[in-house]
Image (spheres, rainbow, N blue to C red):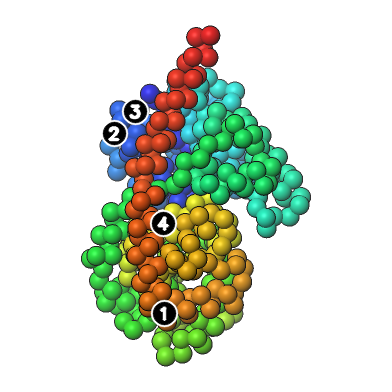
Amino acid sequence: MKTIQIVGDSKFGGATYLLIEWCRYLLNKGVEVHALTTDEPTIEQLIEIPGLHIMADVLIPREISPLKIVRAAFALRSLLKQEEYDVLHTYSSTPGFLGRIVGKFSPVPVVMHHQAGFPVSEFSSRAHRLIFGRLESMAINAATKSICVSHAVMEQSKTLGIGRADKLVTICNGIDIEPWELAARDVDRLAFCKEIDVDPDTLLIAATGRLADQKGLPYLLRALPQIREGLAETPVVVVLAGEGPAREQLEAIIEELSLQNNVRMLGFRRDVPRIVAACDIFCSPSLWEGLSISIMEAMAAQKPIVTTDILPNAELIDDGETGLLVKAREVDGLAAAIVRMATDSALADACVKAAHTKVRREYTIKRMFDETWDLYNQLLDEASARTRN
């Protein structure tokens, strides 16, 4: 089997993490694997994988740029003609759209997509939903299968009227749990506090992942004054580990609310397990997700979790049992939940134990990859049968 995995110029995040680990899995199965990416942090990790072929000469932009997309389409079409791939597998919005459309008219027998949500949501304008919903439907229908990363994503496809049901299949995301458990066991909180220049008695609230609009981080920052008021005797610092296009917006809010002493922006880090393990609470105020890798990581790291009640998050977190759920975009509710988690140790301990049990039982990366491997082979067998007939 020979496969090309396409993430294009998308920045390092949940999808690229899964792509990297999936490449390792496929190589261990004896598959010839090509990875198409132009993102430097992703390339830095991919070059550490023996036997992997990195394709960095085709730029597939993450942003919507008609000229760049047209150029990328011709370059990708040429590449697919030159190489005899059995499976083309795409990740993220623009590379996913382009890869599926070009793949439909290529010799590749199986065209897949990692469906980590949709380019529209309940928060999108009517015009945005009309245009981008139709484009996404076109891409879904062009592919052999698109893998919904949660039951919530499958349900959203029906609610939003996106794509044919027979073109979608659900394989829930998973993570490698061991690094997070090791980090929780071996954490040196004092050293981390010294590194980011905070007192050891500070309440540290971690938020990890790309600094992007969908992550809802402005709401966490705007909740900080209320959190400080609710925890008057305890200093509070939000630790942001990640990089992305929302950085300037977040910096402006920090300046506006005079939060310079209450926020640490660490940028892109490769030691995220250590960072999460050193913090006291994990918060994900996201507006939309596929199935959050970062929340699963916090579950594995045994951290109390506060997140929004959007469907994919509610699939992971049972309110009051494995964490606390709040309405998206509600600053007051987010602040109150974080204060409650910080002051109710019995609740926090119970949620941590239940969340850890749940992630170990349901969301391992091995389960996810075994199911995806079986799907690859099933679809290749079906394609071969069609060719013979």
Q: Secondary structure at mark 2?
A: helix
Residues under numbered marks 1 and 2 in contact, where contact means CB atoms less than 8 Å apart: no
Q: Secondary structure at mark 1?
A: loop
Residues under numbered marks 4 and 1 in contact, where contact means CB atoms less than 8 Å apart: no
Q: At x 54% / y 32%, what residue is drawn?
A: 145
The CA distance from mark 2 to mark 4 is: 25 Å
Depth check, front residue: 214 or 58: 214
Residue type at tag 1 = Asp
Q: At x 50% / y 45%, what residue is drawn?
A: 149
> What residue would you read off at disc 1?
344
| Mark number, residue 28 | 2
Q: Is 344 left, or right, of 255 in this rendering?
A: left
* Mark 3 vs 4, N-terminal side: 3
Residue type at tag 4 = Met
* Mark 3 vs 1, N-terminal side: 3
Q: At x 37% / y 42%, what residue is drawn?
A: 367
The CA distance from mark 1 to mark 2 is: 46 Å
Query: Measured from the top left, where is residue 359 in percent x and y?
Result: 38, 55
Can residue 8 be seen from the camera position used here? no
Query: Measured from the top left, where is residue 176 in percent x and y?
Result: 33, 50
> What residue would you read off at disc 3?
31
Residues under numbered marks 3 and 4 in contact, where contact means CB atoms less than 8 Å apart: no
Q: Residues within 10 Å of mark 3 (few under 14, many from 20)?
A: some
**Which-is-in-front pick, marks 2 and 4?**
4
The CA distance from mark 3 to mark 4 is: 28 Å
* Mark 2 vs 4, N-terminal side: 2
Name the image quarter holding residue 261: bottom left
Depth check, front residue: 269 or 331: 331
Query: Measured from the top left, where is residue 150 in percent x and y?
Result: 51, 47
